[in-house]
Image: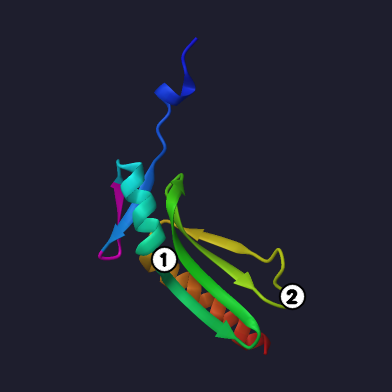
Amino acid sequence: MTNIMQTSRVLVWIERGGVPVECADFQAWAEWMACEREHVGDTMVGPARVSTIFMGVGVHGWLYETALFGPGQVGGPVTRYRTRADALIGHGEHVERLKAME
């Protein structure tokens, strides 16, 4: 029987200049995530917060995520993106949608 830990590989990523780069060193990735990770977007619209982050772990290439927090946003939509550019556009769209509801 084959040990799954010997055959599986977890893909983790860091960003360099806004570009995702695969990171083969899990310890280096963990340190980068603890210190360097920044929001792609973090905007308050009234009491609601639109937060877009680089996740650092991609499932099928989805490396960025926008989530909404605040009143009426519990369990709200989570949107994922493959590129930083798409994440920035999506963040702006969520912000504009919330502003239109004010």
Q: Is residue 18 above or below residue 91?
A: above
Question: Which quadrant would the C terminus be assigned to in this image?
Answer: bottom right
Residue positioned 39% across, 57% down in the render: 33
- Mark 1 belongs to which amino acid? Asp
- Which residue shows up at 46% across the image and 44% down it? 60
Percent x, y for residue 27? 35, 45
Q: Which mark is residue 86?
A: 1
Q: Secondary structure at mark 2?
A: loop
Which class describes the residues within 10 Å of circle 2: few (<14), some (14-19), or many (20+)? few
Q: Residue furthest left?
A: 17
Residue in front for this viewpoint, 90 or 11: 11
Residue 100 drawn above or below residue 39: below
Name the residue at the top extreme: 1
Q: Nearer the viewer, mark 1 or mark 2?
A: 2
Q: Is residue 100 above or below residue 22?
A: below
Q: Tag 1, which secondary structure?
A: helix
Q: How far across and down, in percent of the image, does residue 8 sit?
A: 43, 28
How dense is the environment of label 1, judged by Cα within 10 Å: few (below 14), some, or many (20 and up)? Answer: few
| Main SS class of the magenta portion in the image | strand
The first of marks 1 and 2 along the sequence is 2
Q: In terms of image quadrants, where is residue 19?
A: bottom left
Q: Which residues are magenta?
A: 17-22
Q: Which numbered dot is residue 45?
A: none
- Horizontal side of residue 72 vs 88, given as left or right: right
User: Is residue 28 toward the left or the right of residue 6 in the image?
Assistant: left
> Disc 2 designates what residue?
72
Membership of 36 in magenta stretch: no
Name, please, the residue furthest toward the right.
Answer: 72
Looking at the picture, the colour scheme in use is rainbow
